[in-house]
Structure formats: C-alpha cells, structure tokens
Image (spheres, grey):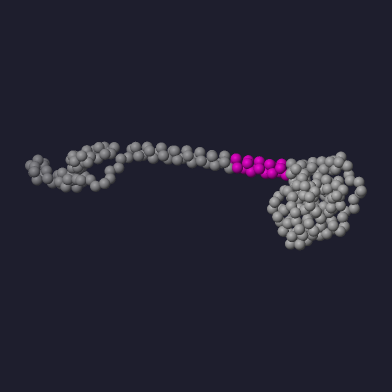
C-alpha cells in the first residue's frame, strides 16, 4: 500500500514512516492538509493517516474535503492524534468521515490493525455528507471544549507559578533581612576595630639600643631615651618610680657615700 502520512512535525512523520516501511508499505509525506490534497491530486494513494492539529488545514478539515470529493470519497482515512482524544473529538472524526481514530503514541500493531480495518471494513456512512453548517457546529463545540481545557491547564500552571513566585519572594525577603542584619553587625565590628586601631600603635622589628646608656637609635640615626622613643611611636605616657631592687642598690650606694648622714643607732 502507498500510505500518505500527514503531520506538521517532521520527527512524527519520520517515526511513523519507519514503522510502516518496516511492514513493507510505501510512504508519502505531507506537512498539512493543503499539501496532502495537492499530493492526492497527482499521485495514487491507498490510505491516509493524518494528525489533527496542523497549520493551514487540520486533520478534520482534510478528512471532510476528501469525503466531499467523488474521486477520494472511499479512501481509507485514519485520524492519529495526541491532543484531540476525548469522546467528543472521536465523534467529530466520525462525523467528518474518518474510518478509524488512534491516540498517539500507539504501537505499530495498533496502526497496522487500524489500517486493515479501514481498508477491509470501512465505517458505514450515509450517502449524503453532513452539511457545512453541521460540521462547523460540531467543530466549534470541539474547539471550545479544547480551548476550555487548555485554559484550565494554563490557569493551573499560572497558579503554580504564582505560588512559586510568592515563595521565592518570601525567601528573598528573609535573605535580605539576614543580609541587612549581618551587614549591620559587620559595620559595628569594623567601627570597633577602627577605634581600637586608632588607639593602638605597635612597635615591631629590631630596635638598636645602647648597651650602656640604653638609648635607642631611630630610623633617622638619632639616639634618644627609651621613654622618648616609645612616647614618639605610641600613645603611652610615663610616670617614674623605683623598683625594690634598684631601691636597695641606691640605698646601699648612699650609705657608702654618706655614712655620717644616717642617724646613730640606739
């Protein structure tokens, strides 16, 4: 059999073609109903397998146009869809003259079985086709139902997206609050650190100091007292006293130098 497959999605046509050619059928392809009618006008086709949802001319309209033609009125026609699969969709397919209806995806055995039935036992149809008005009314009913279904799906998706958006906004608000808290804490810590550093000057490195007078040589090669050097390089202030060891040494020295200055012992 030379089978015309009609589908606007190339990968769908490729898959169906491979299935049919594996069963020794010849396959011709069309991307929509308009192209399918052009092929029928110039080639001999033994059966048509058509998708429904297509641009320019969909599967329902293609079937109706074929049934209106005296040359193709008895051509086996199968609708093959993943979108229009409700009972109302199937009824409309019967109304416009389809022999079989298959829901995508389908195993090759189902497709071949539908082809056999469409060829050997076509659906009994009235000699008179339904009028355009009748077909359009049924078509409109199916389209309205499909649009309502899609709108419901879209609304559900929008509600889900809104919930996700609200959740993300809540998380962002929490993160911003935490960042603000941490920023304030860091600023406070930095202020305290700057204040501490402003009060502290650190002496470091190797300091040259005289072994005898204990003066320190600065970076300009001047010698100055320990007190003067430290006062210049830090904020420290000095008060002078005498440690116990030095006090004893100084007292012993005074005793030797001025023995007569001490009061006599009783």
Is residue 128 toward the left or the right of residue 256 in the image?
Answer: right
Residue at the farthest right position? 127
Residue at position x 73%, y 48% in the image: 31
The x and y percentages for residue 36 are 77, 48
Residue at position x 74%, y 60% in the image: 21
Residue at position x 57%, y 41% in the image: 172
Residue at position x 23%, y 40% in the image: 229
Q: Taking the image as drawn, is residue 41 in sight?
A: yes
Q: Nearer the viewer, residue 245 or 123?
A: 123
The x and y percentages for residue 231 are 25, 38
Is residue 253 toward the left or the right of residue 91 in the image?
Answer: left
In which quarter of the view is residue 47 placed? bottom right
Residue at the farthest front position? 42
Q: Which residues are magenta?
A: 153-170
Quadrant of image for the N terminus: bottom right
Q: Taking the image as drawn, is residue 96 in sight?
A: no
Quadrant of image for the C terminus: top left
Reply yes or no: does residue 96 show up in magenta. no
Residue at the farthest bottom position? 23
Q: Nearer the viewer, residue 124 or 46?
A: 46
The x and y percentages for residue 14 are 70, 55
Q: From the image, give the main secondary structure of the stretch colored magenta.
A: helix
The x and y percentages for residue 55 are 74, 44
Number of marks:
0
In which quarter of the view is residue 258 placed? top left
Is residue 240 toward the left or the right of residue 153 in the image?
Answer: left
In which quarter of the view is residue 197 placed? top left
Q: Nearer the viewer, residue 111 or 48?
A: 48
């Amino acid at each position: 059999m030379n089978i015309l497959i009609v589908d606007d999605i190339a990968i769908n046509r490729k898959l169906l073609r491979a299935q049919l050619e594996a069963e020794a059928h010849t396959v011709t392809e069309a991307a929509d109903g308009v192209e399918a009618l052009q092929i029928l006008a110039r080639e001999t086709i033994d059966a048509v397998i058509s998708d429904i949802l297509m641009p320019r001319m969909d599967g329902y309209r293609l079937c109706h146009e074929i049934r209106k033609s005296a040359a193709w009125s008895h051509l086996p026609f199968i609708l093959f869809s993943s979108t229009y699969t409700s009972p109302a969709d199937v009824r409309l397919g019967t109304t416009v003259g389809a022999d079989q209806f298959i829901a995508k995806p389908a195993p090759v055995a189902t497709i071949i079985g539908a082809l056999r039935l469409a060829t050997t036992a076509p659906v009994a149809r009235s000699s008179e086709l339904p009028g355009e008005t009748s077909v359009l009314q049924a078509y409109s009913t199916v389209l309205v139902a499909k649009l309502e279904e899609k709108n419901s799906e879209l609304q559900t998706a929008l509600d889900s997206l809104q919930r996700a958006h609200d959740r993300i906004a809540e998380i962002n608000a929490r993160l911003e609050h935490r960042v603000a808290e941490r920023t304030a804490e860091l600023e406070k810590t930095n202020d305290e650190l700057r204040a501490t550093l402003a009060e502290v000057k650190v002496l470091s490195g190797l300091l040259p100091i005289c072994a005898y007078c204990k003066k320190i040589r600065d970076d300009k090669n001047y010698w100055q007292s320990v007190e003067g050097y430290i006062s210049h390089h830090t904020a420290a202030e000095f008060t002078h006293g005498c440690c116990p060891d030095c006090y004893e040494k100084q007292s012993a020295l005074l005793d030797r130098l001025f023995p007569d200055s001490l009061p006599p012992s009783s």
